[in-house]
Amino acid sequence: MLRIGMLTSGGDCQALNAAMRGVVKGIFSKRDDVEIYGFQDGYKGLIYSNFKMLTSKDFSGILTLGGTILGTSRQPFKLMRVPDKDGIDKVEAMKHTYHKLNLDCLVILGGNGTHKSANMLREEGLNVVTLPKTIDNDLWGTDMTFGFQSAVDIATDTIDRIHSNVSQPCIYRGSNGAQSRVGNTSCRNCRRCRYYSASGDAI
């Protein structure tokens, strides 16, 4: 039996569900004797042993679903060795959960801080596989993190739309209700021109 723990940590990012789906579908295509333990809300789930059993069916229909079906949270790496408010040693608690469930490995999806914590767990003797998730594309050792290209596409598309809109000729309705077009000069009457006139900027 292959027992795999999986969690997503840090900020939200495009393709989290798609990446998890790819991992699980790939594993189940090779073997049937697999148990997937989905830890809820990032490292918190591993610390407090909050998880749910998942099957390959749980990863169907999520390819284009935003967010993460496991939930996420921020657990700063610099605080990982600081006991929580109840005095619980987070690192020892995560190791305990790992060994209690007899896991063969952890699959962890996250960015810089998440990877630092994952490396710490590796140094503690756990088997860890990480996937680079960040819209910043700033993780050492990988050319392209998942989520980055989607973020760039959305940003450039939005900028293109704004540029296209503000470069159009001014259109406003005169006192007689007729629509007027005055080219690229300021009509001084529409909402856009009144804004720029008040700010002193050129249109």
Image: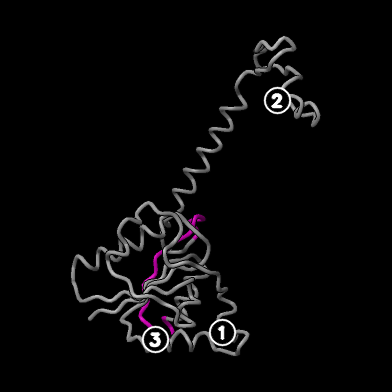
Residue 190: % across, % down:
72, 22
Mark 2 in CB contact with mark 1 (< 8 angstroms) = no
Towards the viewer: 63 or 131: 63
Q: Position of residue 85 (x, y in %)?
A: 63, 85
Q: Nearer the viewer, residue 122 or 150?
A: 150
Q: Is residue 4 left or right of residue 112?
A: left
C-alpha gap between disc 2 and disc 1: 54 Å
The residue type indicated by label 3 comes to: Gly
**Which kind of residue does numbered mark 1 sit on?**
Arg
Residue visible at 32% across and 76% down in the picture: 4
Residue beneath disc 2? 203
Q: Secondary structure at mark 3?
A: loop
User: What residue does disc 3 label?
Assistant: 125
Residue at the spot of label 1: 81
Q: Residues within 10 Å of mark 3 (few under 14, many from 20)?
A: few
Q: In this rendering, does residue 144 appear at all?
A: no
